[in-house]
Amino acid sequence: MEPKELAKNAARILSDKKAADIRVLEVTDLTVLADYFIIATGTSSTHLKTLADEVEFMLKKQGVAPGHIEGRGGGNWLLLDYGSVVVHVLLQDAREFYSIERLWSDAKQYGEDDL
């Protein structure tokens, strides 16, 4: 699956599970880490887990599995690394504190419907 299609699918899955403020950052020209970062906000640690589990489950059905998952211990940030796409699911306080959008402000930013 192409990175843009993977990013679009992950954003849609997050939206379907009621993630808030979904942003897609195209970082292809800024880093070798990934082509896209997806950032979404969950309402509780349970919601974060549900969001991450659903992304993992639905993308596995499409033949794509994450290379690494970080944050399963019940914190305020879950990360799913798909190589070309990294999905960040955070609680609102953590999202404000880490301000990933600000750190990557040179990236092209899209809402979930803009891809």
Image (tube, rainbow, N blue to C red):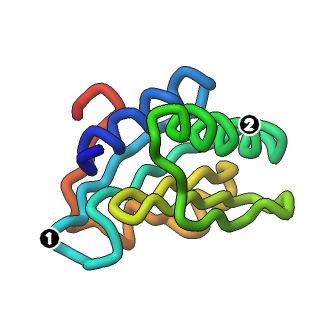
Q: Residues within 10 Å of mark 2 (few under 14, many from 20)?
A: some
Residue named by callout 2: 50
Q: Amino acid at mark 2?
A: Thr
Left or right side of 17 for 62: left
Q: Quadrant of the C terminus?
A: top left
Residue 72 place in picture, x, y as percent: 78, 60
In this view, 32 is above or below 99:
below
The Cα–Cα distance between marks 2 and 1, rounded to whole angstroms, is: 31 Å
Residue named by callout 1: 29
Q: Residue furthest front?
A: 63
Residue 114 place in picture, x, y as percent: 23, 31
Q: Amino acid at mark 1?
A: Asp
Residue at the (38%, 57%) spot, across then down: 85
Left or right side of 28 for 85: right
From the viewer's side, name the closer residue of 88 and 72.
72
Residue 89 place in picture, x, y as percent: 60, 50
Q: Quadrant of the N terminus?
A: top left
Q: Residue furthest left?
A: 29
Q: Residue furthest top?
A: 16
Dot 2: what SS? helix
Residue 97 figure quarter: bottom right
Q: Residues within 10 Å of mark 1 (few under 14, many from 20)?
A: few
Which numbered disc covers residue 57? none
Dot 1: what SS? loop
From the viewer's side, name the closer residue of 114 and 81.
81
Residue at the (27%, 50%) spot, across then down: 3
Q: Are marks 2 and 1 in contact (CB under 8 Å)?
A: no
